[in-house]
Image (cartoon, rainbow, N blue to C red):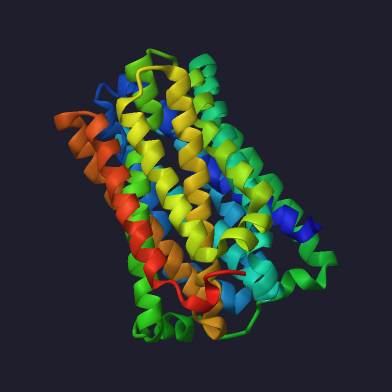
Amino acid sequence: MRRDVLLLSMAAFASAASLRATDPLLPLIAAEFVTTAGSASAAITAFVLSYGLLQVVYGPLGDRFGRVRTIAGASLLSAFGSAACALAPSLEALVAARFASGATIGALIPLALAWIGDSFAYERRQAVLARFLIGQMLGLAFGTALAGWMGEIFGWRAIFVAFAVLFILICAALAFELARNPLATQGTAARPFVRGIVRLPRLLAEPPVRRLLATVLAEGLLMSGAFAFVAVYLQQRHHVGPGLAGTLVAAYAGGGLLYAAVARRAVAALGERGLVGVGGAALALGFGGLAVSPWTASSTLCIAVVGVGFYMMHTTLQTHATQVAPEERGSAVALFAAALFLGGASGVWLAAQAIDAIGLAPVFAAAAVGLAILSAVVRRRLPARHARR
């Protein structure tokens, strides 16, 4: 992996770790602030909501100042947001701090994706994206596992102190890369920021862009709404602690890494339609299995299957996001991320209401059915020329 891609993958690691770190901590947060896990999940909703909303700002910022430079600045701001989470004196303060953190951490992965789109030909892009996303997958794995164990031993605030330090290190590494690698400045268009914002409605007027955004909005709602509560489910159904629950959720990243290892061959053998079809089937099987699984081992296997299925389908959608509007790639990818995370925020909120009323199993079953239907729709809509590579 090239050094610049590796550093961006590290930023993706930090972003994904911060995104999922709160999941296994919900019972601990709820206990400290005397509320339910569903109410404590407002910290997740706030993070995901701001992550999505601010994409319309970071896309044009990346176009104006450069993707990597913007990522470095956002990493520094993210360190302050993480420190505020660690110091939060109330649930309301934690929710506000997580909202602020999501607003800055939201720049990292989408702008890195746009930079990869600038730097690699379409034929190579999906394989590069799969390798880049190794950082994201490891972040999901270590974020949930480390947060769970640190929360169990040191309290839920400890993980946010660790994130503050990590974001400072990433900012320093990217600043060094900008100083020595001319390729890292690729994607700087010197465009006025306001003009970048004004161009967004023009992108939304394009039917292919709207279809892609509607698809990823539905994906985020169905996937994130259910997955945010997997760690809580493990603690409630299988009576494990936050540390072990977070570690078991890391099987999701293991499934994603398995796909990354075979991505090039899978794309060649299945084509994009095949990837989406198999991915949708795996998502349905994984979430459906979680809804009925009586054993910890089988639940962990289901989590891994969800990881394989999600990355098979989602990397296909991400690849199209880098190509749907090549002249406005940064803004297009930002809109893509905004739709994904606004869908995710809506999904977490809806799932929280359902969980307090009817429990977790029906939420997983609904996600299984919904994702199966979505994958069938996406598969049918993919252009024939991209059916096989």
Q: What residue is rendered at 35% in x and 60% in y?
A: 376
Work out whether 1 lies above or below 113.
above
Q: Which sits in the foreground, 75 or 313?
A: 313
Q: Is residue 196 visible?
A: yes
Question: In the displayed image of the protein, which residue is found farthest to the right?
Answer: 180
In the rendered picture of this protein, how many numbered marks are placed on residues?
0
Work out whether 284 lies above or below 329.
above
Q: Position of residue 67 (x, y in %)?
A: 63, 69
Quarter of the N terminus within the rendering: bottom right
Q: What residue is rendered at 45% in x and 40% in y?
A: 306
Quarter of the C terminus within the rendering: bottom right
Left or right: 67 as drawn, with respect to 307: right
Q: Position of residue 262 (x, y in %)?
A: 66, 50
Q: Which sits in the foreground, 335 or 107?
A: 335
Q: Position of residue 199 (x, y in %)?
A: 43, 85
Q: What residue is rendered at 57% in x and 27% in y?
A: 146
Q: Which sits in the foreground, 11 or 89?
A: 11
Quarter residue 7 falls in = bottom right
Q: Is residue 106 visible?
A: no
Q: What residue is rendered at 38% in x and 31% in y?
A: 230
Question: In the displayed image of the protein, which residue is found farthest to the left?
Answer: 357
Q: Which sits in the foreground, 30 or 359?
A: 359
Work out whether 31 lies above or below 5.
above
Q: Position of residue 260 (x, y in %)?
A: 64, 49
Left or right: 141 as drawn, with respect to 357: right
Left or right: 31 as drawn, with respect to 267: left
